Amino acid sequence: MYYKFSGITQKLAGSSSTAYAPQGLRPGAPAESSSLIFATPTKVVSEAKPVVEYLGANKVPDLQRIFQKSDGIPIHLKRGVPDRLLYRTTMALTVGGALYCLVALYMAAQPRK
């Protein structure tokens, strides 16, 4: 038995013995292929320009050589001075923010006079 939602009673009600078949949908693909609206001339592969023009040299092999070297340096410090500067700045801001939070918590815990 099949059920359908009744809009009047707001409950599920018994339906006829056929499954739900929506009327607005058409089965299958269209019989005819549609004509092209914006037809552009095609190019032969030899006439086409390169698909992608790179703006610079490929740096991936160099970076792989740097990051895969086993020298005991953590991965986030492998590129030298810029990495050390960013790491130390981040650590300073983190410690400063934690201290500021502790001071603000201490001040909030004190009763007002």
Image (tube, helix red, strand yellow):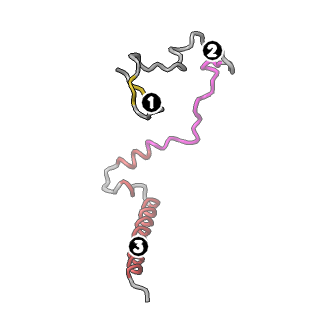
Magenta span has 38?
no
Residue 6 x, y percent position in the rendering: 45, 30
The residue depicted at 49 percent of the width and 20 percent of the height is 22
Question: Which of these two is toward me, 98 or 79?
Answer: 98
Question: Which of these two is toward me, 49 or 104?
Answer: 104
Mark 3 vs mark 1: which is more N-terminal? Answer: 1
Three-letter code, disc 2? Ser
Q: Where is 83 relative to 95, above or below?
A: above
Q: Name the residue under label 3.
A: 101
Q: Name the residue under label 1.
A: 6
Residue 99 x, y percent position in the rendering: 39, 74
31 sits left or right of 66 in the view: right
Question: Which of these two is toward me, 111 or 86?
Answer: 111
Residue 12 x, y percent position in the rendering: 39, 30
Q: Where is 33 relative to 95, above or below?
A: above
Magenta stretch, overall SS: loop
Mark 2 vs mark 3: which is more N-terminal? Answer: 2
Q: Give the range drawn in magenta.
A: 42-61
Residue 34 x, y percent position in the rendering: 63, 14
The residue depicted at 41 percent of the width and 16 percent of the height is 18
Other-residue count near label 2 (Cα within 10 Å), few / some / many at <14 / 14–19 / ≥20? few
Q: Mark 2 points at which residue?
A: 34
Three-letter code, disc 1? Ser
